[in-house]
């Protein structure tokens, strides 16, 4: 899979982050400033049609985006399923489509609270 990514941190726990609509791996606002880079390694990826993957062909469906994310994570030795078999979705009441811009502190707190339970 052709991928573009930005890595932040060097911790033992690896986290894959996917951007929002019309975003890119470089479009996380100030969120990285509030993450713990000593505990976690965050990888922000570009989806097909965005950022450095703008010219990558595809169907551009949610299923394809999920498959690309899993393929990238499964490179991080199937860490997605190994480390997070109990993954969950959290609705952020203080944000709309762009929590990394609208509420970066509460997003970072929510992410790391979840990761800390693992």
Image (cartoon, rainbow, N blue to C red):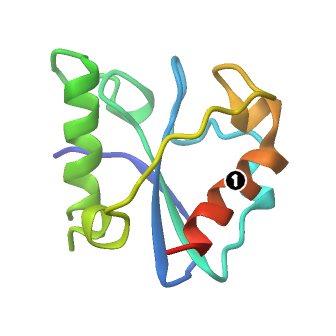
Say which of 95 and 86 sits in front. 86
Is residue 11 among what the camera can see?
yes
Residue located beneath label 1 in the image: 110
Say which of 65 and 56 sits in front. 65
Q: Is residue 1 above or below residue 7?
A: above
Helix, strand or loop status at disc 1: helix
Q: Which residue does the image show at 47% across and 62% down from the upper left? A: 15
Q: Which residue does the image show at 55% across and 82% down from the upper left? A: 11
Q: Which residue does the image show at 77% across and 32% down from the upper left? A: 101
Residue 51 in which image quadrant: top left
Residue 6 horizontal/vertical position (percent): 50, 55
Residue 118 horizontal/vertical position (percent): 49, 75
Residue 84 horizontal/vertical position (percent): 37, 64
Q: Which residue does the image show at 70% across and 33% down from the upper left? A: 92
Q: Is residue 69 above or below residue 34?
A: above
Crowding at mark 1 (Cα within 10 Å: few <14, some 14-19, many 20+): some
């Amino acid at each position: 899979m052709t991928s573009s990514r930005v890595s932040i941190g060097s911790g033992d726990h690896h986290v894959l982050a996917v951007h929002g609509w019309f975003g890119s791996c470089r479009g996380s606002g100030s969120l990285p400033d509030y993450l713990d880079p000593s505990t976690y390694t965050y990888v922000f990826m570009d989806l097909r049609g965005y950022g450095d993957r703008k010219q990558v062909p595809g169907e551009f469906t949610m299923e394809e985006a999920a498959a690309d994310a899993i393929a990238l994570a499964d490179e991080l030795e199937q860490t997605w399923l190994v480390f997070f078999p109990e993954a969950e979705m959290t609705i952020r009441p203080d944000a709309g489509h762009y929590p990394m811009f609208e509420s970066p502190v509460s997003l970072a707190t929510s992410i790391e609270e979840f990761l800390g339970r693992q």
